[in-house]
Each structure stands twice: as structure tokens, then as C-alpha cells.
Image (cartoon, helix red, strand yellow):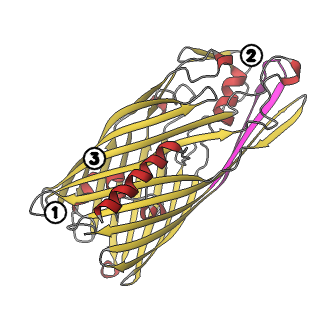
Amino acid sequence: MRRRFTTLAVLMVALALSLPAWATNGDNLIGVGPVSRAMGGVGVAAPQDAISAVFSNPAAMCFGPYCPASEVNFAGTAFMPKVNASVTNPAGAFQADSKDNVYPIPAIGLSVPITEDPTKFRFGLAAYGVSGLGVDYRGTALDNSNFAGSGFPLIAGEYSSLQIMKFAPAFGWQINQKWAVGLAVHIDYATLDLRSGSSPGYAFGFQPGVIWHPVENLSLGLSYISAQSVDHEKVFPAAFGGGDLTLESPQQATIGAAYTFLNGTLLVEADAKWLNWSSAKGYSDFDWKDQWVFNIGGQYQVIEKLFLRLGYNYGSNPVEEHNGWGAGSVNVQGTTFPDYYYETFRIIGFPAIVEQHFTAGIGYQFTETFRLDLGFMYAPENTMTEQGTDVFGNPVTIESSLSEIGVDFGVTFRF
């Protein structure tokens, strides 16, 4: 059994490092694993499996349904975004759909006791694709490096691929029956490709968390994640100087509450998360604003072995809207962009603009040691439009639209 776990874990991590991941709150996933994602991404106060405990709040490893046993989760998300963009200028309207793909995003998680008292001290470990974004307009009407014979490209940002894989060892300590604290160490591996080849890098961070049970059936959680910065070398296209770009995952803080009703068969949980995009390197250069994410989810135990889940997640669009830009220029970490190309890169190349997410899922406990979970997410289309002046002094309108579907699958083993 242990050998099968190890083999599956290695395969899933290898898959995560070889495939791009898409995301939805800015460029972050709404949650990790089919249970949390089916409940709108909640989990800071009462995560229901080991993987979402490590991801959301390591202190929760001491109080969850997986405690006092040991638990291993294997999960995956099939992410299916639909992206399109257009540029309208005096020469005509140029529209294209980004190449459709199904992006597999794997995740694994573990929580085990490390003392004789299985609830006192616990160790956790998780690996998951947590952030990513990208478009692929190569070979479309938007991919024109010599627009109208001018020697200038039609847009900047016709291809982009950002992916971030996170490894997180974590520890939880139950102080007493009401309080627990935890700490996770984040080790990030990130790659960025802007059509000049993939540029990898590493980052490190930390995540403290706390859980408080003030009264029976009520759980309150608080978690913080530090900013984590990666330097991507020579990542900009040669047409813009081939310079470097530092991207920093923003610091974020989450607070949540969970309450159980109906003799423990109904769990309702809500979180509020703040992401500090405006102070994060790279994102602040492209004028992202701070984002508040609000999510609510519920889990109902219909019968002893069957669980139904629903959720909703709202995160405001972090990309600032600009209008009226002209023939000026913007400096991004030493690389100078004309206003027009700066805006097409922001809006068309990195369209992190969806806001609403509707989620649902189901879980079935086949035995005391094995559970299967399925989840579904739908993010309806959101569109962003800007107007300004192109490099030739002509009026231009640029637009991007994004919608998303995600299907989640996971298996849980307890021992």
C-alpha cells in the first residue's frame, strides 16, 4: 500500500510541473481538493480533509474529521477555461478565441499524528498547483508581428503561461480543547513563459494559522500567508528588450467561521480573504488592485455515507480598468512598453477577470478507510473593455472575456 501511495504521489507531482494551471481569484485557485472547491473554496475554520487543512489553515489539522487518524488525499482538477479577445481599430475588428485546452491540476495531501496523543501534535504535507494563468492566441488573427506592414505587432501578450506549484510541510499543535495553532512552510516552484521560453524560479514563504472553538458546534479560524517572490530572467519578448520580470504572490489573510447544525449532519462555513495585489511585485507594475474574496459553502450528510455540497465564491476583479491612454510609455521593472502594448498585455495577455463561482459536489464513504469525492465549478463569463490610442495615433478598443468550468475528483485513505 505504501509503495502505491509513493508511486501515485510522484506521478502527480511530475504532472503538476509539466502542465500549466489556470486560476480564478486573481491567478489563485478558489480552493484545493474536491471537498473545499465544492463548498466554494472555504476551509480556514473547518476544512474537511487533510489537503484543504494544509492549504487553508494548518492549525485545523488537530480538529478535523481526519483526526485522530492519519489521512492521505489524492485529487485532481480538470480545468476548462474559455477565453477570447478582440482589438478594434480603423483597420477593422480582429477577434480570436484562445486555444481551448483541458488543464489537469493535481494535488496530494497528508496529515498524521507525531505523538502518542494523536490530536496533540500533527504533521502535514501537501503539494498542489495553486496559481496560474495564460492565453494562447498564436496563429490567430491577433498574432500579427507586422501589422499592416508597419513593422509593429498588433498586440503584446498573444501568448502567456504562468504556473506555480507549491510544496507545504506543516505542523499543528492542539493547545487544549478550544485552541490550536499551526504553521506551514511554503516552497514554490514557478515558471513563466511570455513566448521567449520558459523561465523557472523558486520562492519561500510561511503560513501561520489559529483555530478557536468558543462554544460547541462553532469554529473560528484565522490564517496568514506571506508574500513569495520569484525572479524570472529574460522572460519578455525580444521586441520589448527581453528583460527580466519579478512576480510576487501577494500576502493574504483569511478569516472564517463554521457552524454545525442538525446533530452534526449540516456544516455551514464562510470565509473572507484579503489579497494584497497592489503591493506585490509584478502585479503592482501592471496595476492590479487589492482583492476581497467572500465564499460560503455547506455540506449535508444525507445518510451515513453520503455527503452533498454546495458553495459560492465571489472575488472582485483585481485588474484596474484604464481608459483614455495615449502615446506615452510605461516602465515595468526596466522594460519600457508603449501605453498601447502595456494595456494589451494587461487585458489580453493576463485576463484574470472572472468574479463569480458556483460550486457543487458529492462524497461517498465506501468504507471507514476510503472515500470518493467529486466536485464541479462554474464561473460565468466576465468581460473587460478599454479604449485608448494605439501606437499609430488611431482610436482603438481592446476587450477580453473569460469563463471557466472545473471538474474535481479525489480519493481519501485513512489508516
Name the residue beneath numbered marker 3.
169
Please state which amino acid type lies under the numbered disc 1.
Answer: Thr
Image coordinates of residue 285 in percent, x first then y, are 54, 25
Q: How many marks?
A: 3
Q: Residues within 10 Å of mark 2 (few under 14, many from 20)?
A: some
Disc 3, SS: strand
Pick the quarter of the image with the N terminus.
bottom left
Q: Secondary structure at mark 2?
A: loop
- Please check the rendered image and state whether residue 403 is part of the magenta-colored stretch, yes or no: yes
Q: Name the amino acid, label 2.
A: Ala
Mark 1 — residue? 119
Q: Does residue 137 appear anywhere in the picture?
A: yes
Label annotation for residue 335: none
Q: Nearer the viewer, residue 28 or 319?
A: 28
Tell whether 223 sits left or right of 94.
Answer: left
- Apparent side of residue 68 relative to residue 269 in the rendered image (left or right): left
Kindly report which numbered mark, 3 or 2, lies closer to the viewer in this rendering. Answer: 3
The answer to which of 409 and 356 lies nearer the viewer is 409
**Marks 1 and 3 in Cβ contact (< 8 Å):** no
In the image, what residue occupies the spot 78% across and 34% down? Answer: 142
Q: Position of residue 49 (x, y in %)?
A: 34, 63
**Residue denoted by label 2:** 327
Instruction: Report the predominant secondary structure element of the magenta stretch.
Output: strand
Query: Which residue is situated farthest in the left direction here?
Result: 116
Residue name at image x 54 percent, y 37 percent? 162
Find the residue positioned furthest to the front: 3
Q: Which residues are magenta?
A: 380-404
Mark 3: few, some, or many residues within 10 Å (few <14, many ≥20)? many
